[in-house]
Amino acid sequence: MAGNRTFSMIKPHAVADNHIGGILKLMEEGGFRIVAMKKTQLSAQQAGKFYEVHSERPFYGELCEMMSAGPIVALILEKENAVADFRKLIGATDPAEAEPGTIRSIYAKSKGENAVHGSDSDENAAIESAFFFSGFERY
Ligand code: DAT
Ligand code: MG
């Protein structure tokens, strides 16, 4: 059975460009309830840990640098079928392929600076949520 929570991050370029409010609005209008939220900044080492599964990919160094370049907003979001529905709301990794109206189609600048992260499975949603939030920070 699909779980009802997913993890998201608003990436540094979108935070720097004052798009936190616009992106949260699309999340809420998309039917997601904010369970947990914090603004923080990752070190390059923490970004490397978060994206460890991509460590063999050619863009890994660039990805860790970009994700630690400024503050991010970390979120746990709740909705039925959260992981799949949120991936639909954010759109494809490459904004050129993202469906119109999706968060990435509106706010992404490139494949790397693509505005938001969204978990790709219930298991990763749980792992990624625990990376940022304790049990006492989820309401
Ligand atoms: P997604 O974020 O859609 O799950 P992913 O898991 O394949 O995509 O990759 C993680 C992040 O790595 C992605 O959001 C941005 C970056 N990335 C992926 N492919 C890239 C590429 N070809 N060039 C630069 N950055 C890339
Ligand atoms: Mg991914």
Image (cartoon, grey):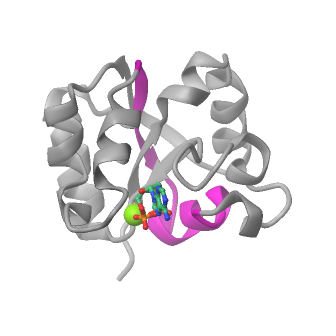
Q: In this view, does 47 lie above or below 4?
A: above
> In the current view of this chain or complex, which residue is farthest to the bottom?
1
In front here: 38 or 77? 38
Place of residue 35 in the rendered image (x, y in percent of width and height, measured from the top left) = 40, 36
Residue 65 picture quarter:
top left
Q: Is residue 34 visible?
A: yes
In front here: 83 or 108? 108
Q: In the figure, is residue 135 to the left or right of 67?
A: left
Q: In this view, does 3 lie above or below 127?
A: below
Residue 130 picture quarter:
top left
Residue, x 73% and y 69% (percent of image)? 97
Is residue 127 found inside the magenta-colored segment of the image?
no
Residue, x 34% and y 71% (percent of image)? 121
Place of residue 107 in the rendered image (x, y in percent of width and height, measured from the top left) = 72, 40
Quarter in which the N terminus is drawn: bottom left
Is residue 78 found inside the magenta-colored segment of the image?
yes
Q: In the figure, is residue 75 to the left or right of 108?
A: left
Residue, x 29% and y 67% (percent of image)? 57
Tell me the quadrant of ligand 1. Answer: bottom left
In front here: 123 or 5? 123
Q: Is residue 133 visible?
A: no
Q: What stretch is highlighted in magenta?
A: 70-93
Quarter in which the C terminus is drawn: top left
Residue, x 59% and y 47% (percent of image)? 114
Place of residue 127 in the rendered image (x, y in percent of width and height, measured from the top left) = 18, 55
| Number of numbered discs overlaid on the protein picture | 0
Residue 53 picture quarter:
bottom left
Q: In this view, does 58 lie above or below 108?
A: below
